[in-house]
């Protein structure tokens, strides 16, 4: 009998926020990342994958952690480097790269 074990994608996203307000530039980046995560939730649901997002708000003392994204505990830049995607900055990770890293993490083919 085949296993029907549910897969999970746990996303941790660390981003900047002061007094519940982000700057316009950070707000644009945040909207793009939220869009990518919502797209992933929809797409991966078809594969039986449950996507869970944890947002961690950082302050200026942790600015080096700005917009870091972890997929199942692995920093996305490490996944993108392994996949040959170069020249990506945390705040500039495109939707396609986030999807590629997520599919790679789960061992799924990106159509």
Image (cartoon, helix red, strand yellow):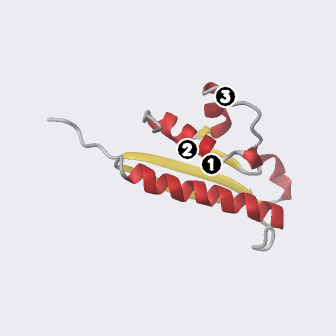
Residue position marked by numbered label 1 in the rendering? 95
* Disc number lying in front (2 or 3): 2
How far apart, in angstroms, are the residues tagged by discs 2 and 3? 14 Å
Q: Is residue 110 above or below residue 21?
A: above
* Residue in the picture at 36% in, 51% down: 46
* Residue in the picture at 81% in, 46% down: 64
* Residue in the picture at 69% in, 53% down: 14
Asked whether residue 38 is in view, the answer is yes
Residue position marked by numbered label 3 in the rendering? 81
Assess disc 3: are there few (<14), some (14-19) or many (≥20) residues with their C-alpha within 10 Å of its C-alpha.
Answer: few
Residue 53: assigned label: none
* Residue in the picture at 62% in, 26% down: 82
Image location of residue 9, percent across then percent down: 47, 47
Viewport quadrant of the C terminus: top left
Instruction: Tell me where residue 25 sits by quadrant.
Output: bottom right
How far apart, in angstroms, are the residues tagged by discs 3 and 1? 16 Å
Of mark 2 and mark 3, the one earlier in the sequence is 3
Assess disc 2: are there few (<14), some (14-19) or many (≥20) residues with their C-alpha within 10 Å of its C-alpha.
Answer: some
Q: How many marks?
A: 3
Judged from the image, the secondary structure of the residue bearing numbered disc 3 is helix
Instruction: Tell me where residue 107 sits by quadrant.
Output: top left
Asked whether residue 57 is in view, the answer is no
Residue position marked by numbered label 2 in the rendering? 99
How far apart, in angstroms, are the residues tagged by discs 2 and 1? 6 Å
Viewport quadrant of the N terminus: top left
Judged from the image, the secondary structure of the residue bearing numbered disc 1 is helix
Q: Is residue 110 above or below residue 63?
A: above
Assess disc 1: are there few (<14), some (14-19) or many (≥20) residues with their C-alpha within 10 Å of its C-alpha.
Answer: some
- Left or right side of 38 for 28: right
Q: Is residue 110 above or below residue 50?
A: above
């Amino acid at each position: 009998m085949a296993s029907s074990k549910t897969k999970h994608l746990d996303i941790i996203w660390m981003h900047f926020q002061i007094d519940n307000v982000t700057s316009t530039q950070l707000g644009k980046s945040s909207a793009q990342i939220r869009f990518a995560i919502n797209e992933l939730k929809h797409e991966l649901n078809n594969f039986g994958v449950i996507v869970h997002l944890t947002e961690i708000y950082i302050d200026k003392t942790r600015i080096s952690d700005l917009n870091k994204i972890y997929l199942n505990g692995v920093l996305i830049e490490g996944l993108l480097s392994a996949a040959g995607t170069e020249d990506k900055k945390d705040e500039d990770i495109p939707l396609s790269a986030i999807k590629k890293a997520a599919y790679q993490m789960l061992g799924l083919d990106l159509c």
